[in-house]
Every structure is written in structure tokens, then in C-alpha cells.
Image (cartoon, rainbow, N blue to C red):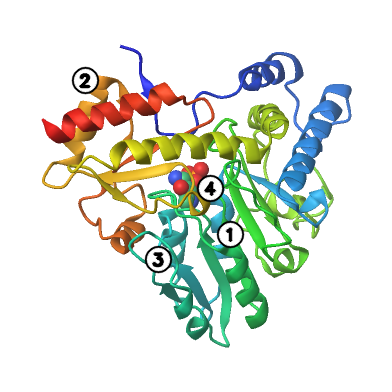
């Protein structure tokens, strides 16, 4: 039995042709680090790294120089960099009721920092009416999951960006589930920072991601990690400039080469086209399960407000057992449970039982969706 991969929200699979070749070329033929040595292969690696920053800046309409595209191990690291690097005792932070533990856990670790959650409705959307009342004079940061990794709801980030600008607080967008899936315009959303992983919708390998941030926010951050940068080596202090100040240690060069090749594919396809494909499959999936009385959709049907992350509950059944059967009997790979986002499940009313999540990617087909719907029909009826 061939397997059908529907766990792209965890990490995308397959990767576009060219990603593994590019990583192999680095490992076999380049093998040098950046910023430290002057021979040709090191220069090549440096140019490749700069090119990656430039592509990321272009993709997200980033108005600052490419130096402000900081390469990270993933979204988690970028989110921690801002949350822990910025907030101090006495500060206040606002988050949504849909956040991932990559936001909630660093926030919970910070003693003396208070936070409020904007409630979300049972489809996973912010209750915008609650927004204005949450800002305080000491509100320093607003962190928002652009799209939910549980149910795919996409928030109105522009409205949040405008509110943050009015109240003079920084706005950090968690683009883990939208980067590569949904257009993100850094300037139009009035972001202070955008954290993205390379291995999800950007279709690169794991272990590489980026934090794009404004000069104003960067100047307010204390770096989480200090070490060698290959620059200002006469000093035991971190250089004051980006990206070096936030990029200590030898970078993940195989990851940089892999992500650059992946982004060539994303740019050639275009995010809009990738989104259209994903949404068409999503519609087909939602239409397919709509008549199934034993399958409950957790999230919205509205195509304009979602990405292809689909959560379902099988009332009266054990979702974990159903997910197990999806693989054993039908070869369908999903993720079941709370998806590292207990807060989101509380908002959706699916805590603690969780949901079965089907998440679509560029390589999925109508046949994949039809097979998943048929399997759900059989399991929910059987
Ligand atoms: N935020 C959201 C909404 C996510 O879905 C994820 C990954 N599941 C993360 C943050 C963290 O991303 P990473 O594990 O790549 O650091």
C-alpha cells in the first residue's frame, strides 16, 4: 500500500526536486562556512547565504535591508529570540487564544511578565471586539499565530497591526503556517517581526528558518546567544550590527543551500498559485466530509479565511484509534491529538480529546483527498 502524506503542517513532504541536490552539492563540493575565511568556496557560501536573505526579504515584502533577515534554526528560535530578548519584568504582552507552545512556553518561562489572551471563537478566529480593551500602557509586544496549526483559520493580521501601531507596541507574527501558503506583506501588515520555519510551506529542510525584524525592534532585543560571528574578532563583545548580533555560531549551511533551492521553486510557482492548488483540494475535502454525519469539522468552511489545515473530530469515537486505522488500513498519514497547541484546542472546544488533522501540501492531488474522505466515511460508519 502506498502512503498518502497529509501531515504537511508538521513538516512538508516531499520537497521540490533540487533541494536535496543543492544540500548534497554543498556537502560534497563546497563545505565551507561564511564570514570567516576568504578562499573562493567560502565566498561562494557567503553569496549563497546573502542570496537566501534577499529571497526571503522579497517573498515577504520586507522593507528593511537583507541584513535584517536573521537566519535561525526555525520558527521556535525566532519566536524565543523576540519574546525572551524583549520582555522584562513589569512588561505586558498580548497573545491570541490560538497560540502554539512555541509562543506560550517561552512566555510562561518569563517571570514577572504578564500576558492576556484575546479570546477566539469556536472556528478559531480572534474576537476583534475584545482587542482594544487589552492594551495597557506597559504592553510591549503582541504575538499572533497568523494561521492556526490546528484548524487553519487565518487571522486578520492587518487589523492587529493597525491596533499595535496605534498603541505603540511591537507586533510579532508567527508565520509558521502561512509562509509559502498565504501571502504575507511585512509592511502592509505593519509587522515588527516575522518568524518563519524553512521546513513547512517554504518547502526546505528542517533546522533552518528566519526572523525578519525592524531596526527598532532589533535595537531593543538582548541576544539570547553570544559567540563567534566571524566579524569584529578583536572584541569579546558581540558586534552591534545585524545579522551578526543575532547569529552567533557556525550557521546551518546545508540548510541554507536546501532552503535556497526550495525558495527557487516557491518563487517560480508563486505563493498565489500554491495557495489556489491547496484551497481547491481543501474545498474538495470539506465538500466530501460535509454529508458524513459521523465526522465533525473543527474550523471554518470559508476558503478566504483559511489554509489547508483541516481538523476533524469523530464524535463518540476514539480519534487516536481512528488516526491509527487511517494509516494501517488506508495508508493515510495524519497527526492526531493536541498539536502542541493546547490553548488553540481550548478555544475550539476540542480540549483535551484533540482532533485528527489532515494538512495539505503542493504535491497532494485530488486522488489523495478522495482517498482520505473515503477512509473517513468507512471509519466513521464502521
Ligand atoms: N508556530 C506554529 C503555529 C507552528 O505550527 C509551529 C510548528 N508546528 C511552530 C510555531 C514552530 O515551528 P518549528 O517547530 O519549525 O520551530
User: Would you identify the image quadrant in which residue 312 lies?
Assistant: top left
Q: Secondary structure at mark 3?
A: loop
Give residue 197's position: percent from left, percent from top. Answer: 57, 43
Q: Secondary structure at mark 2?
A: helix
The answer to whether 204 appears left or right of 30 in the picture is: left
Q: Cα distance, mark 1 to mark 3?
A: 14 Å
Q: Residues within 10 Å of mark 2 (few under 14, many from 20)?
A: few
Residue extending furthest toward the bottom: 137
Q: Determine whether the beta carbon of the residue marked 4 sits less than 8 angstroms from the nearest atom of ligand 1.
A: yes
State which tag comes first along the sequence, 3 or 4: 3
Q: Residues within 10 Å of mark 4 (few under 14, many from 20)?
A: many
The residue under label 4 is 176
Q: Residue at x 80, y 39 (%)?
A: 50
Q: Secondary structure at mark 4?
A: loop
Which sits in the foreground, 128 or 107?
128
The answer to whether 363 appears left or right of 162 in the picture is: left
Quarter holding the N terminus is top left
Give residue 282's position: percent from left, percent from top. Answer: 44, 39
Quarter holding the C terminus is top left
Q: Cα distance, mark 3 to mark 4?
A: 16 Å
Residue extending furthest toward the top: 1
Give residue 26's position: percent from left, percent from top. Answer: 71, 20
The residue under label 2 is 329
The residue under label 3 is 97
Q: Eyeballing the image, is 188 above or below 72?
A: below
Q: Residue at x 40, y 33 (%)?
A: 7
Which sits in the foreground, 154 or 291?
291
The answer to whether 358 appears left or right of 20 in the picture is: left
Q: Check whether the beta carbons of the residues at disc 3 and disc 4 lie within 8 A of each other.
A: no
Q: Residues within 10 Å of mark 1 (few under 14, many from 20)?
A: many
Q: Determine whether the beta carbon of the residue marked 1 sits less than 8 angstroms from the nearest atom of ligand 1.
A: no
Amino acid at each position: 500500500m502506498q502512503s498518502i502524506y497529509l501531515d504537511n503542517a508538521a513538516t512538508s513532504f516531499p520537497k521540490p526536486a533540487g533541494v536535496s541536490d543543492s544540500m548534497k552539492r554543498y556537502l560534497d563540493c563546497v563545505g565551507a562556512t561564511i564570514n570567516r575565511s576568504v578562499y573562493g568556496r567560502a565566498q561562494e557560501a557567503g553569496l549563497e547565504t546573502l542570496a537566501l536573505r534577499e529571497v526571503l526579504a522579497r517573498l515577504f515584502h520586507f522593507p528593511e535591508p537583507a541584513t535584517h533577515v536573521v537566519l535561525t534554526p526555525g520558527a521556535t528560535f525566532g519566536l524565543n529570540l523576540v519574546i525572551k530578548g524583549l520582555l522584562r519584568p513589569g512588561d505586558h504582552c498580548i497573545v491570541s487564544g490560538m497560540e502554539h507552545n512555541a509562543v506560550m512556553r517561552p512566555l510562561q518561562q518569563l517571570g514577572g511578565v504578564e500576558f492576556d489572551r484575546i479570546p477566539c471563537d469556536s472556528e478559531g478566529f480572534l474576537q476583534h471586539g475584545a482587542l482594544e480593551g487589552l492594551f495597557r500602557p506597559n504592553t510591549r509586544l503582541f504575538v499572533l499565530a497568523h494561521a492556526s496549526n490546528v484548524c487553519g483559520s487565518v487571522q486578520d493580521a492587518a487589523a492587529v497591526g493597525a491596533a499595535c501601531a496605534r498603541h505603540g507596541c511591537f507586533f510579532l507574527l508567527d508565520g509558521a503556517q502561512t509562509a509559502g501558503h498565504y501571502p504575507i506583506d511585512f509592511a502592509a501588515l505593519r509587522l515588527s517581526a516575522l518568524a518563519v520555519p524553512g521546513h513547512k510551506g517554504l518547502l526546505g529542510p528542517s533546522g533552518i528558518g528566519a526572523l525578519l525584524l525592524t531596526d527598532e525592534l532589533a535595537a531593543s532585543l538582548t541576544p539570547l546567544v553570544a559567540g563567534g560571528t566571524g566579524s569584529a574578532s578583536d572584541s569579546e563583545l558581540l558586534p552591534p550590527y545585524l545579522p551578526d548580533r543575532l547569529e552567533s555560531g557556525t550557521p546551518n549551511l546545508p540548510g541554507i543551500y536546501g532552503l535556497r533551492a526550495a525558495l527557487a521553486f516557491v518563487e517560480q510557482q508563486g505563493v498565489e498559485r500554491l495557495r489556489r492548488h491547496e484551497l481547491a483540494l481543501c474545498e474538495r475535502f470539506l465538500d466530501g466530509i460535509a454529508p458524513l454525519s459521523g465526522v465533525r469539522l473543527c474550523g471554518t468552511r470559508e476558503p478566504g479565511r483559511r489554509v489547508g489545515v483541516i481538523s476533524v473530530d469523530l464524535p463518540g469515537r476514539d480519534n487516536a484509534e481512528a488516526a491509527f486505522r487511517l494509516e494501517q488500513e488506508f495508508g493515510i498519514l495524519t497527526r492526531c491529538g493536541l498539536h502542541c497547541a493546547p490553548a488553540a484546542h481550548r478555544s475550539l472546544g476540542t480540549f483535551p480529546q484533540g482532533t485528527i488533522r489532515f494538512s495539505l501540501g503542493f504535491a497532494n492531488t485530488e486522488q489523495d483527498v478522495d482517498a482520505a474522505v473515503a477512509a473517513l466515511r468507512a471509519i466513521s460508519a464502521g
